[in-house]
Amino acid sequence: MSTIIDYQNVDVLRKEHVVLKDVSFKVDSGEFIYLIGKVGSGKSSLLKTMYAEVPVTKGEARVFDYDLLQIKRSQIPYLRRSIGIVFQDFQLLFDRSVFENLDFVLAATGWRDKAEREARVDQALRRVGMVKKSYKLPHELSGGEQQRVVIARALLNNPQLIIADEPTGNLDPETGEQIVAQLHDIAADGTAVIIATHNHSLIESFPGTVMHIEGKHLIGK
């Protein structure tokens, strides 16, 4: 088991305002982690530092072999290729089929071989049980099915880390549990998964490491 995230005494700022202070934690490969906190507590900001959308300016922060305080703009796409991101609001292209949504991501991240792209899309959709609906447009799918497609999209580059920001926020409780079960299985296969949520009932159904954000501080871990 290897350490893929290592934060020591990190401050997280948004527009010069301190959102989180002295954040320290480590994440190992295959670990399943809940990031718990109220709306506006800084969960999303912390997650965004991990893929260099929000800069880190204090402390020590490493994701894989990248030093987030020293990372160059040209390195950020390579960092992000090793991270799968699952958004609450899906962010699918509604004028393209499920297959075309995933193929577009691969083409945009440098995969030129069409046959190889097709094989990767097929593999990712099979993992989430959506291969038979690859021809459908997103609006023809339920919310749960759209979120499965988003998870498939996150798996395309065989990431070492999946970040899920409130992945059940737009889903009914039963469908939300199915999505978290899927992510739990992915962690069991060796990919680290971090889920930001304020749904404490999920923790009882799918155990994992819990980190709380309270009063600008990260507690636990």
Image (tube, grey):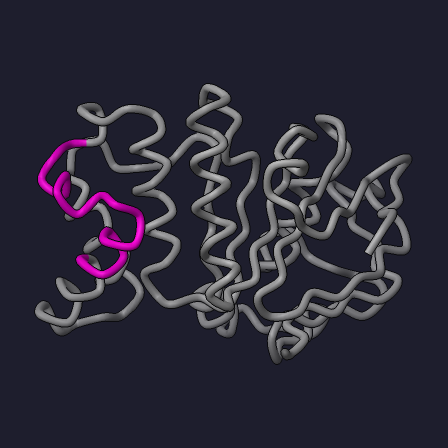
Q: In the rendered view, does 91 fall on the left or right side of 36?
A: left
Q: Position of residue 110 (x, y in %)?
A: 27, 70
User: Is residue 103 in the magenta section?
Assistant: no
Q: How many marks?
A: 0
Q: Write down the quadrant of residue 68 in the picture.
A: bottom right
Residue range (magenta): 122-137
Residue extending furthest toward the front: 205
Nearest the viewer among 66 and 203 is: 203
Asked where in the image residue 114 lies, by quadrant, the reply is: bottom left
The C terminus - image quarter: bottom right
Q: Position of residue 78 (x, y in %)?
A: 45, 72
Is 170 drawn above or below residue 184 in the view shown?
A: above
Relative image position of residue 137 (x, y in whole percent): 15, 32
Q: Is residue 104 left or right of residue 157?
A: left
Q: Residue at x 27, y 57 (%)?
A: 124
Q: Image point 46% across, 54% down: which residue?
A: 185
| Residue 26 shown left or right of residue 152 in the figure | right
Against 3, is 118 above or below? above
Looking at the image, residue 145 lies above or below residue 71:
above
Quadrant, the N terminus: bottom right
Residue in view at x 79 percent, y 61 percent: 57
Name the residue located 90 percent from the left edge and 55 percent from the top edge. 22
Residues 66 and 172: in front is: 172
Q: Quadrant of residue 72?
A: bottom right
Q: Nearer the viewer, residue 188 or 164?
A: 188
Residue furthest top in the image: 172
The percent position of residue 143, horizontal first and vertical second, equals: 34, 25
